[in-house]
Image (cartoon, grey):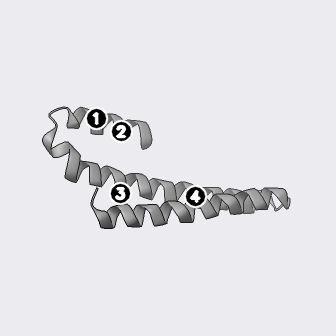
Amino acid sequence: MNCDTKKSTIQRLRRIEGQVRGLQKMVEEDRPCAEIINQVASVEQALSGVSKVLLTSHLQHCAQHDPNAIDEVVQLITRHWR
């Protein structure tokens, strides 16, 4: 993973961490379930975005030199994007 990708991925994960803390607070405050569910969906989308960035990085940097990479990538996609 290049330095810029690593930096932006860490920033994204920190934002997601803040979103999850916000979800905890919403539950503690007995906020309406619909609001919480909307925020959960937002976190799921954000995590999916991180997964896509990591998969792209893996394909660009790691998988090019590994003959088993195609099988590994297929397994990752199958497991994470059903």
Could you say where residue 66 lies in the image, as x and y percent from the top left? 16, 37
Left or right of 15 on screen, residue 72: left
Residue where numbered disc 4 is placed: 43
Determine whether label 2 and label 1 are within 8 Å by CB: yes
Left or right of 39 on screen, residue 28: right
Q: Determine the CA span between mark 4 and mark 3.
A: 15 Å
Mark 3 or 2 closer to N-term?
3
Residue where numbered disc 1 is placed: 72
Residue at figure coordinates x 73%, y 63% from the top left: 35
Could you say where residue 7 lies in the image, as x and y percent from the top left? 39, 65
- Characterize the local packing of mark 3: few (<14), some (14-19) or many (20 or more) Cα atoms within 10 angstroms: some
Residue where numbered disc 2 is placed: 76
Q: Quick one: SS at disc 1?
A: helix
What number of labels is visible?
Answer: 4
Quarter of the rendering occupied by the N terminus = bottom left
Quarter of the rendering occupied by the C terminus = top left
Q: Quick one: SS at disc 3?
A: helix
The amino acid on which the numbered mark 3 sits, given as a three-letter code, is Val
Q: Quick one: SS at disc 4?
A: helix
Q: Determine the CA span between mark 2 and mark 1.
A: 6 Å
